[in-house]
Image (cartoon, grey):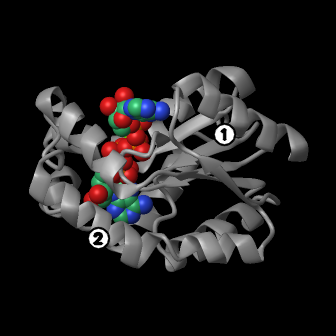
Amino acid sequence: MFNIVIFGGPGSGKGTQSDKLISHYNLFHISTGDVLRDHIRRGTDLGNTANSYISKGKLIPDDLMVSILEQVLIDNAQAVADGVIFDGFPRTIPQAKALNEMLQKRGNKVNIVIGLEVPDEELTERLLKRGLESGRSDDNRETIAKRLEVYHSQTAPLKAFYQNQGIYAAIKGIGTIDSIFQSIQEAIDKVK
Ligand code: AP5
Ligand code: MG
């Protein structure tokens, strides 16, 4: 099992680069944002709860998020056997510790954290542009600003957490999608 965490601010390209990684490395993709948006679309109770956080740019509470992720791993036990791309999870130190425990239980670990580093101005520009057609309740100027604030205060500390474990690979997340993917591939192939 080879597990990748793809990490970065809102709009840093986690989803875009995950799509390329899936086909190249044959890994299972879990985007917690996509999982939550699917619940919102289906109008489930969880979807209603999630939307009250997402539309404000706030994080879903750790306990709830960890149990959702654990369930995705259980429901897809076969598909995750070769490895997973975790996109948008973990987002807090407690989530990162929970992920380590979940993987340890299965005799596995996070092998590499791909940190897509993109300046805030570029992130804002990308998300405003996407907001013109995405229909996402969080792609508006006010919520984008909140997402960035939450990213810097609650999620960015994970960089040091993973640097201490020696598994953080910093990737310059600006430029063409293909050139960024090439840097990611080089970082992965060094440890795979
Ligand atoms: P989530 O869905 O994870 O959103 P996000 O982190 O805000 O990031 P995005 O999905 O918007 O961006 P991305 O990095 O995937 O970039 P993308 O490839 O789309 O989370 C949403 C919300 O759900 C959270 O705010 C929270 O409320 C909740 N949530 C989710 N996970 C949670 C967790 N673990 N704990 C608690 N709450 C959680 O690209 C963005 C745009 O840029 C696209 O239009 C793309 O075409 C474009 N683009 C991509 N690459 C480039 C490039 N190189 N140059 C120019 N444009 C580019
Ligand atoms: Mg995404």
Quarter of image, ligand 1:
top left
Location of residue 100 in the rendering, given as x and y in whole percent from the top left corner: 68, 69
Q: Residue at x 54, y 33 (%)?
A: 17
Are the two marked residues, 1 and 2, in contact with CB atoms closer than 8 angstroms? no
Q: Which residue is mark 2?
A: 149
Neighbours of disc 1 within 10 Å: few (<14), some (14-19), many (20+): many
The tag on residue 80 is 1
Q: Is residue 50 visible?
A: no
Q: Residue at x 18, y 45 (%)?
A: 139
Q: Is residue 92 visible?
A: yes
The one of 135 and 67 positioned closer to us in this rendering:
135
Q: Closer to the N terminus: mark 1 or mark 2? A: 1
Residue type of the residue flagged with mark 1: Val
Q: Residue at x 12, y 48 (%)?
A: 140
Relative to 21, does residue 23 appear above or below in the rendering?
above
Q: Residue at x 21, y 66 (%)?
A: 146
Location of residue 72 in the rendering, given as x and y in whole percent from the top left corner: 49, 48
